[in-house]
């Protein structure tokens, strides 16, 4: 307010007589209500000063505008300043009014008229509104763009995720957990690797902990399968006492897991192709599948190991470790080993653990352990174990359509009542035993030049077979055929080969040979009987028996040759004798000795006057010969034949010495 | 989560597969989904047309502020409708994963036959390898026994 202070005086608040009537009735003014009093007070506020200020400012403006044309340039923002002042004053009045109203003083607004707006004010208001609206639309536009980007990203992520999931579903069982997933963005998908067909067989009672694999999102939104570390285990088979060495199957399994789950490799190759992601996931799942299969094999092995069964003898058991004795002086261990990512540090500990657990069998005997004592290949044994498990367990669930085409390689584990583990152990034992038999046969064949060893694969895991063949040299055969048709009744089929078959079933050796020393044949003395005899023996006696068989075949052949040459000869166990004049006999005797390094079959010429017995002959042979015995040496068939012919001619010549 | 055999792509014309009740349920489900799609798209269209209509500038600024708030609300609704459409698409994909039995069965059958063929091929290969190994062994044995070292041993006295 200005400096002038105006004072207004109120009447005293006493009742004053308003009117008095002639009759004397006094009329007082009616009492004003509280509100009315207040209203009156407010009405008395004089706004003239404000109005006057406006008018004088306008007058001043006019006057100043008229006078200010001349020297001083008008302040460019003057009008705006004045407008702001006026606005400020009006606002302060209004604020006072509001404060009064707030203090619960009633205010009655008589009327308010908005001053008519000037066109520029109208336009400026419109401009402001338009600008505001435009701003609003811009912000909406930004919001839409942001949302669109986010939605696009989500669409892309989902497309990748579901695309990959559908591709995975082509090969694996995808399932969903019904409960709400706790982690955001996780829809609860998982892959079920449990095989119901195996479960039905009731042989496997323990579902694997890793058969449920959760599907998660990796940071890029793509499908990812994360396995807990060391969750996958694989089967490892070993012969105790043999050098463990590197197992190529183990290293390949480890490499697959190592390559797919190595975080350092993932950071190196940055944006991985979706195809590559899916392929890697496939291989990870495949490894888990294999791990489950190995676990099931181990479980089945454990179950069967403790059923009493032929060929199975448990000698050690620990967690995930089973040791069996399979006979033939061998023990095997079957272990579930974790397929670890870090081969360097942990693998050493793993193998150390295994080696510490192994008690080499040879040290018990006191002999030194051999690096490769003729055991079959460890990897092939592992594969074989898994294969017969697979055939046995999965073959039961199928109709047998697969069995028809597998007969060539089939193993028929259940036909002889053995469990599959029993069959496996016996197969291994058979392999070890047949290796020993083969060694003996090879040694024998090395000692007798005219014997050939022919292997005959049986395609059966517990049967092996070889043939020892004595081949008559072609030169003798040709000369023999010339005399064949000389008219005398002789054997029509001149054999060029004499065969002895050795068959090993599990650990039983069976020898089948023609012309075997046969009691019946000896009595009948008939040349037409070609006796086939079969008899069993053990490993220690095998060389001697085979040598005797071979020698008897040679004797038999010589006998036939002698008959063909027209001379009567007497065939005995291992000797061929010719009768001379005066009752003397001249004989060709075979002596067999498997330990002889120069040759296993040696020949003696024996002169017998009918009074010495065989025992003395043997004694004299071992003494190195005498006047009636002559050591001929380790003769080949050619030389034997020519010796025979010489004997024949000698006998024909009258027997003169 | 099995959605009752609904196959959007393969249709419901599969032979004696679904029973009448299942087919009816599938049709109902299909109808519901289509309705949802219609709702969402209608939502988006309506809100967008309102946004466009409201672009006129009015005199009282109060109305403009009101309209500004309305516009924000409509935009949010549009985005929400788009999001719900996206969820619908996800649901459809999940349905496809868990219920597209026809294509899955076909694929599984195909893979089974492929694997059987591969198994047979492997068996044949193994038996061929075995036969070749046996033949080679026989040949090698006969060569060895007719070879010079053996024959020289043969002629030794």
Image (cartoon, coloured by chain):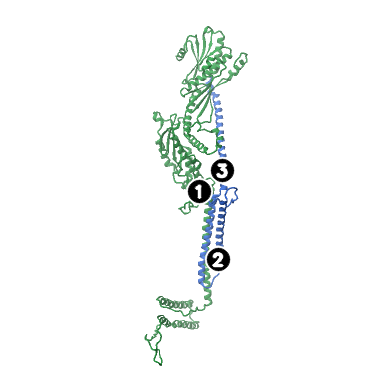
Chain colours: A green, B blue
Subunit under mark 3? B
* Disc 2 target residue: B50
* N-terminal-most mark, 3 or 2: 2
Q: Is mark 1 on a helix, strand or loop?
A: strand
Q: Name the residue under label 1.
A: A175
Task: Report x, y in % for residue A537.
Answer: 48, 23
Mark 3 secondary-structure assignment: helix
Residue for point 56% across, 39% down: B116
Chain under numbered label 2: B
Q: Which residue lies furthest to the bottom in this view?
A: A22
Q: Residue A555: give x, y in percent of width and height.
A: 53, 16
The answer to whether residue A297 is above or below residue A22 is above
Residue A445 drawn at (x, y percent): 51, 23
Marks 1/2 in contact by CB < 8 Å: the verdict is no
In this rendering, position of residue A22 left or right of residue A151? left
To which residue does mark 3 refer? B111
Dot 1 and dot 2 within a common chain:
no
């Amino acid at each position: 307010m200005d400096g002038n202070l105006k004072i207004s005086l109120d009447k005293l608040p006493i009742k004053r007589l308003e009117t008095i009537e002639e009759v004397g009735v006094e009329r007082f003014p009616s009492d004003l209500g509280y509100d009315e009093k207040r209203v009156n007070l407010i009405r008395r506020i004089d706004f003239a000063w404000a109005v006057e200020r406006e008018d004088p400012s306008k007058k001043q403006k006019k006057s100043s505008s008229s006078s200010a044309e001349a020297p001083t340039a008008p302040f460019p923002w003057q009008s705006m300043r004045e407008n702001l002042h006026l606005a400020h004053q009006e606002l302060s009045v209004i604020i006072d009014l509001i404060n009064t109203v707030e203090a619960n003083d009633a205010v009655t607004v008589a009327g308010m008229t908005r001053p008519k707006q000037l066109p520029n004010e109208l336009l400026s208001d419109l401009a402001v509104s338009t600008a505001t609206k435009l701003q609003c639309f811009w912000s909406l536009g930004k919001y839409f763009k942001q949302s669109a980007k986010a939605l696009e990203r989500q669409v892309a992520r989902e497309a990748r995720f579901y695309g990959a999931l559908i591709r995975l579903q082509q090969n694996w069982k995808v399932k969903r957990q019904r409960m709400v997933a706790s982690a955001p963005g996780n829809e609860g998908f998982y892959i079920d690797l449990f095989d119901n067909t195996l479960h039905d067989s009731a042989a496997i009672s323990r579902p694997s902990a890793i058969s449920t694999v959760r599907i998660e999102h990796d940071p890029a939104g793509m499908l990812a399968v994360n396995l807990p570390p060391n969750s996958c285990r694989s089967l490892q088979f070993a012969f105790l006492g043999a050098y463990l060495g590197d197992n190529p199957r183990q290293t390949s399994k480890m490499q697959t897991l190592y390559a797919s789950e190595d975080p350092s490799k993932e950071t190196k190759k940055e944006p991985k192709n979706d195809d590559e992601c899916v392929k890697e996931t496939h291989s990870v799942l495949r490894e888990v599948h294999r791990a489950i299969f190995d676990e099931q094999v181990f479980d089945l092995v454990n179950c069967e190991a403790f059923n009493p069964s032929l060929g199975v003898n448990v000698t050690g058991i620990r967690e995930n470790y089973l040791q069996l004795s399979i006979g033939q002086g061998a023990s095997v261990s079957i272990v579930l080993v974790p397929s670890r990512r870090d081969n360097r540090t942990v693998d050493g500990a793993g193998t150390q653990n295994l080696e510490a657990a192994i008690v080499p069998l040879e040290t018990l005997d006191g002999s030194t352990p051999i690096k490769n004592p003729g055991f079959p290949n460890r990897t092939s044994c592992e594969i074989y174990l898994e294969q017969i498990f697979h055939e046995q367990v999965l073959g039961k669930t199928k109709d047998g359509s697969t069995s028809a085409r597998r007969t060539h390689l089939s193993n028929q584990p259940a036909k002889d009542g053995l469990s599959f583990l029993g069959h496996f152990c016996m197969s291994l034992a058979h392999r070890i035993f047949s290796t020993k038999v083969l060694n003996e046969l090879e040694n024998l064949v090395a000692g007798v030049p005219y014997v050939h060893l022919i292997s005959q694969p049986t395609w059966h895991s517990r049967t092996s077979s070889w043939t020892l063949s004595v081949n008559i040299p072609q030169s003798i055969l040709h000369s023999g055929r010339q005399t064949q048709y000389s008219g005398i009744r002789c054997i029509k089929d001149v054999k060029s080969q004499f065969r002895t078959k050795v068959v090993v079933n599990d650990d039983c050796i069976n020898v089948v040979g023609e012309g075997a020393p046969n009691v019946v044949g000896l009595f009948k003395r008939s040349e037409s009987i070609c006796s086939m005899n079969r008899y069993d023996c053990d490993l220690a006696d095998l060389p001697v028996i085979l040598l005797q068989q071979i020698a008897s075949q040679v004797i038999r052949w010589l006998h036939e040759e002698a008959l063909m040459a027209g001379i009567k000869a007497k065939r005995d166990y291992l000797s061929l004798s010719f009768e001379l004049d005066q009752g003397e006999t001249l004989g060709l005797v075979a002596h067999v000795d498997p330990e002889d390094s120069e040759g296993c079959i040696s020949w003696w010429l024996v002169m017998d006057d009918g009074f010495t017995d065989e025992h003395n002959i043997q004694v004299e042979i071992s003494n190195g010969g005498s006047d009636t015995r002559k050591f001929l040496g380790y003769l080949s068939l050619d030389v034997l034949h020519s010796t025979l012919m010489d004997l024949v001619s000698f006998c024909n010549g009258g027997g003169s010495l | 989560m099995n959605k009752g055999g609904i196959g959007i792509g393969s249709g419901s014309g599969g032979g004696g597969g679904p029973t009448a009740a299942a087919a009816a349920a599938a049709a109902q489900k299909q109808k519901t989904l289509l309705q949802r799609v219609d709702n969402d798209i209608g939502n988006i269209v309506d809100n967008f047309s309102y946004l466009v209509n409201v672009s006129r500038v009015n005199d009282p600024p109060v109305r403009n502020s009101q309209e500004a708030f309305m516009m924000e609300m409509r935009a949010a609704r549009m985005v929400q409708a788009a999001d719900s459409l996206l969820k619908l698409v996800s649901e459809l994909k999940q349905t496809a994963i868990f219920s597209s039995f026809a294509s899955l069965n076909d694929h599984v059958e195909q893979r089974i036959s492929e694997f059987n063929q591969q198994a047979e091929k492997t068996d044949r290969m193994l038996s061929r390898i075995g036969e070749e190994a046996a033949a080679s062994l026989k040949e090698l044995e006969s060569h060895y026994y007719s070879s010079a070292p053996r024959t020289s041993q043969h002629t030794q006295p």
